Image: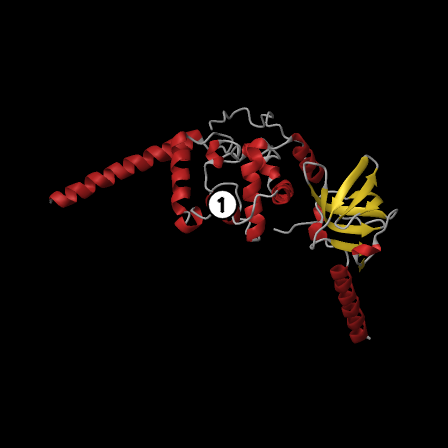
Amino acid sequence: MSIRKYAVAALLALAGSVSMLTAHDAAKHKGTPTQGQIASVAVDSFQVKTATGTVKVSFNKDTKFEHGDDVVDKTHFTKGAKISVFGTKLPSGEIVAKEILMGNPKAATAKDEHKH
Amino acid sequence: MRLSKTIIVIAVIFIVCFAGIALFVRGHGFSAREEPSSAETYVARKLRSFAIPADIRQASNPVEPTELAIAEGRDHFADHCAVCHANNGSGQTEMGGNLYPPAPDMRTPVTQNLSDGELFYIIRNGVPFTGMPGWGGEDSENWKLVLFIRHLPKILPVELEFMDEINHLGTGQGTTKTNPERERKE
């Protein structure tokens, strides 16, 4: 009985680890995400309509696209999709995305991150 | 005979000096809220500079100063450094202003005149006997921090707002006197 308990605990721990690996990369999160709706799609950027206006969200080879816990291709994101963006804001207001999530992100704030 | 006399004189001088220091410390107490003396500051900075290996001191930043690299350094600084150094690098925070020595105003020549390599070395290894920890970290991230430190004297208000979104420390215009007992001499 006790061995079975340990086996179940080990399986749960393993499942937890896998889920942590595939879920959002907290190391990329600094601050709160910018949330909005994709207004238009270009080759290397989206225009995203937010509560405070429209911002340009650009992406590069390091940008991670996710839908729920799945990593997806950027073509998965189309006009009208609601997204959350974690990234670096440039003084111009443009956001260079590190991670773009479709749907509501899990609670992930700057406190999750401690890379150093 | 003459040698032993010299030894006795040196020993007496040593004992008198030690007793003097002991009496001073005993009567004076200590407080990290005091401003380090200029002699102490001078010696400490010279020692710090002397201790940094020449090859690292002369190293130049391998990361191109692009807008994105500076912004990434800014976010990193907001996340790890600003609690002591303030978002604007003034050092005027509750933590930084009460350290001994206090966190420097990084916008002034005291910091800006350090070489890229010296800044990198200090970020990675810290400074013993101060509040500056050795962060270690990835080299590329540390070099981006160096880029941002160079950018501090001309930081824009909008960038301070971005930093405040991350750490909620305020936009730190460098006017808050956190320790009025200290007169900043830089």
Label 1: how many Cα within 10 Å (few below 14, some 14–19, many 20+): some
Q: Is residue A68 above or below residue B70?
A: below
| Residue nearer the viewer, B129 or B23 | B129
Chain letter of the residue beneath label 1 in the structure image: B
- The reply, left or right, for residue B56 in relation to residue A8 is left
Expressed as whole percent of the image width and height from the top left, the position of residue B183 reads: 49, 24
Q: Is residue B43 above or below residue B137?
A: above
SS for callout 1: helix
Residue drawn at x 74%, y 63% is: A17
Expressed as whole percent of the image width and height from the top left, the position of residue A81 reads: 87, 48
Expressed as whole percent of the image width and height from the top left, the position of residue A78 reads: 85, 51
Residue drawn at x 33%, y 33% is: B20
- Snapshot quadrant of residue B26: top left
- The reply, left or right, for residue B14 in relation to residue B97 is left
Tag 1: residue type?
Ile
Q: Which residue is mark 1?
A: B122
